[in-house]
Amino acid sequence: MTLRSHVRHLHHGRGYPRAVALAVALTIGGASGCSDSVAPVPGSVAGITIDSAAGPITRSVTVRMDQPAPVAVTYGAAGTPVLTLLADSASIEHRLTLPRLRAERSYRVQASVPGGLTAPLDAAFATGALPPELAEIEFTVTGTPSLPVALVEVVGAPRTGGLLIVEEGVIVGAMPVTNGALFGMTRRENGHIVLLDPELGLVVRRLDGTLAHRLPQPGPDAPAGYGRIHHDVTATPRNTILFIANETEPVDGVPVVGEALWEWNPEAGTVVRRWSAFDHLDFAPGQGARSNAGNWLHGNGISFGPRGNVLMSLRNIDQVISIAPDFSRVEWRLGGVGGTLALPDGDRFWGQHYVTEPSPNRVLVYDNGFERPGGAYTRAIEYAIDAGRGTATRIWQYRHAPDITASLVGSTQRLPTGNTVVLFGMLAGQNGSTGPIAAVEVTPSGAVAWRLTFGPQLTRVYRLTPVGSLAGEVPGQFRTP
């Protein structure tokens, strides 16, 4: 079975317009039949089986056909969006995990052959209650987001942690990690979710929570080479996985802990070192105010730019760097000690987390403002980079009104609509933060279009990633038999 996933991959949502077009075609075909010039697709649905073993809000559907054919599965409950998944291979049996289910709801599910003339087959199921540690989490929502689903990476909470999937202020999915602290998540083209588990390493899970692949933390069962995996992981343009790991080298007889970038191919089982800070940066002159031999740079964010270059945030030296697509050199260094781009003092960032390049030579930084001279506040700030002239010019920023200070964690991401989502990820009182933990989607002019505020059950949220779908599901409607 081939599932047409059309996954919204991280920030940019590749493939979504085509998925919408498929859903529209499916709806039209189901409502009015096929035109005279298009032969109907043969086959019909013989049976539907619902599997509830994976948890209270996880359901997998097995659809049996009377002959090999594609299938469309539509599902919804009162007060929830009606969604459609399309499996476009001609198979005798299809198994699909239904994303974005809500707790304690009675769902209708309908399976049909897209473009066929046979009547759809209906079934029903009920979801269970969320576990108490998830049910108690409070959300307040105002406005409407550009993308309906938020992937929330929870670092700190007294009773839970890991990935929360939230829609309309409701938890519609969760994937825990072993000690509750999730410092990095990404998605692959097939919709699988990669979690940076502090104890297990990189864990690749299917949407039903089952394990697809794992790269362990260093230890007796780990391949030799890479150090402790920490603070961020991202999918590459080749659908492999790039991650940050510690690397230790002697400098003047003292062991110094720096950073390296490694690429993991889960299918091939290979792990290759692509870049090392010791090959491109100098420890002695390259220390920031928070640097020490045990934590020189504190890499805490990586992402790919439009050219295939890698953006990397180095918090301990208040600097962002761009690494060439072939990892052969550092193209430029923005901010901090040894910066190669001229930057006015008022436009510097301090203790930053996360960086992206939403369009060529436009760099968006989440500026925590930690230890900012003159007073702390947190903002999103965007620069125009001119590497030839050696300059970085501020072209946009967003500061919450009133100011919010989030000393650690947090993120900012540009959406396809041109709006920007900014996550202030620290509860009041945490490391001098003012709180609250809140995500806001703002227009280019700074107007707030959507706001998600978290209750005190969460103390730190590492990142929030908006997405349009989890498995290629699109808005749908039930067919009339």
Image: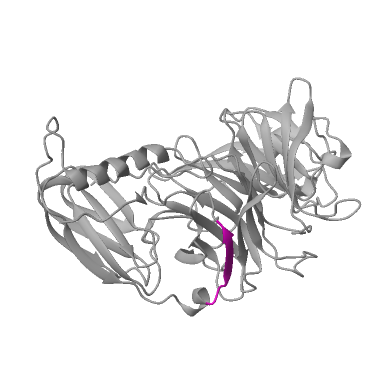
Residue 190: image location, x then y, percent: 37, 45
When the figure is inspected, residue 287 is found, relative to residue 81, above or below; the finding is above
When the figure is inspected, residue 348 is found, relative to residue 78, above or below; the finding is above
Image-quadrant location for residue 77: bottom left
Report the predominant secondary structure element of the magenta stretch: strand
Residue 217: image location, x then y, percent: 54, 56
In this image, 103 relative to 415: left or right?
left
Q: Extreme right residue here? A: 374
In this image, 230 relative to 5: left or right?
right
Residue 375: image location, x then y, percent: 88, 55
Residue range of the region highlighted in magenta in the rendering:
136-143
* Closest to the observer, 381 or 264: 381
Image-quadrant location for residue 359: top right
Image-quadrant location for residue 211: bottom left
Q: How is the image coloured?
A: one colour
For the question of whether residue 398 can be seen, the reply is yes
* Closest to the observer, 71 or 157: 71
